[in-house]
Image (tube, rainbow, N blue to C red):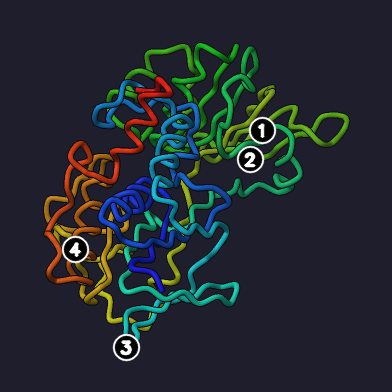
Amino acid sequence: MKDVTIIGGGPAGLYAAFYSGLRGMSVRLIEAQTQLGGKVRLYPEKIIWDAGGMPPVSGEDFCAGLIRQGRTFAPEVHLETIVADIKQTADGFQVLTEDGNSFKSSSVIVAAGGGIITPQRLEVEGAERFDMTNLHYTAQGLETFRNKTVLISGGGNTAVDWANELEGIATNVMLSCRSALKGHEAVVEKVMCSTVDCMLQTSIQRLIADESGTRIKQVELQCGLDAGRIVDVDHVLVNHGYERELAFLNGTSLALEMEDQRITAAANGATSVPGLFAAGDVAVHPGKINLLAGAFHDAANAVNAAKTFIDPEAAASGMVSSHHSGFAKRNEALKKAGQV
């Protein structure tokens, strides 16, 4: 039995784990993926500028910091664990997982973001045979594309961002989009004024393999109703969006109020189910800010609400870390090690 079970190991879930520990709560953290970090982990080399108090930082380094902070108070962590349902019990909640486990806690914080994220696959015959070579759905390392010819398929923010990122790394960058580019105005303007070959009104029709049959050598593009343009490539990067799966929320037996696949919540994370709170992208509430700063704010509010739900006599909010006695020994150790 834990004080709180946190569902989701992204920014909101990890900060909720830290803040729960700061408030003296016992924590269980459940994450469906093989690693903690959430959606940020999909973009390890993207630069994050809008995290408060942080200089520009790569997604990979930001994830590392999030995980280190989230594990400060040694929460019980379960990776590769998919939640199947949440049930209310006489003494709290029972979280059921697809592998047959059952976890009990006095409260639950859902910080599942958009759910289990899976990149949408390229719907072209035989595409799957190139998954292990030069067909990519995420760009895990920019060096892979250095001095190469890269075709990017997609027209949203991610596709346009990668085109801009790769312009100075790859020898040649092509961007294929079915219609108009739909990214933010500034990044779309940047890519349209760059050396990237923006091929609007086109889509991938066929992947042509090399002699080994294991790598893509050429791509045939369909232009409107006409197929025909064939381009040479070293790599193909597909950004067609993500499939998001939140089955445990859509099928739960709880009377949980939802809005467009997200949980309707108050500003403090409270939901229509007493004792169950929501934080991060999975929550919608008045004044919601869809930034990393907003995820941390949601997480702290949800933890404070969970704390007072469990113990109505508890303080409404936690003490700032600089005044928190629980950090005294840790601070001394950091000073001795020269880390602060």
Mark 1 or mark 4, which is nearer the start of the sequence? 1
Give the label, 4 or 1, closer to the camera: 4
Give the label, 2 or 3, closer to the camera: 3
Is residue 317 placed above or below 85 in the rendered structure?
above
Cα–Cα span, label 4 and label 1: 55 Å
Along the horizontal axis of the image, is 72 left or right of 223? left
Return the x and y of residue 61 as percentages of the image width and height.
Answer: 45, 29
Where, by quadrant of the figure, is residue 333 drawn? top left
Asked whether the residues under the numbered discs 1 and 3 touch, taking CB atoms below 8 Å apart as contact, a structural biologist would say no
Mark 3 or mark 1, which is nearer the start of the sequence? 3
Along the horizontal axis of the image, is 280 left or right of 37? left
Mark 3 or mark 2, which is nearer the start of the sequence? 3
Q: Which mark is residue 205?
A: 2
Q: Which amino acid does label 2 sit on?
A: Gln
Q: Quick one: 254 or 320, which is closer to the camera?
A: 320
Mark 3 or mark 4, which is nearer the start of the sequence? 3
Query: Where, quadrant-wise, is the N terminus in this rendering?
Result: bottom left
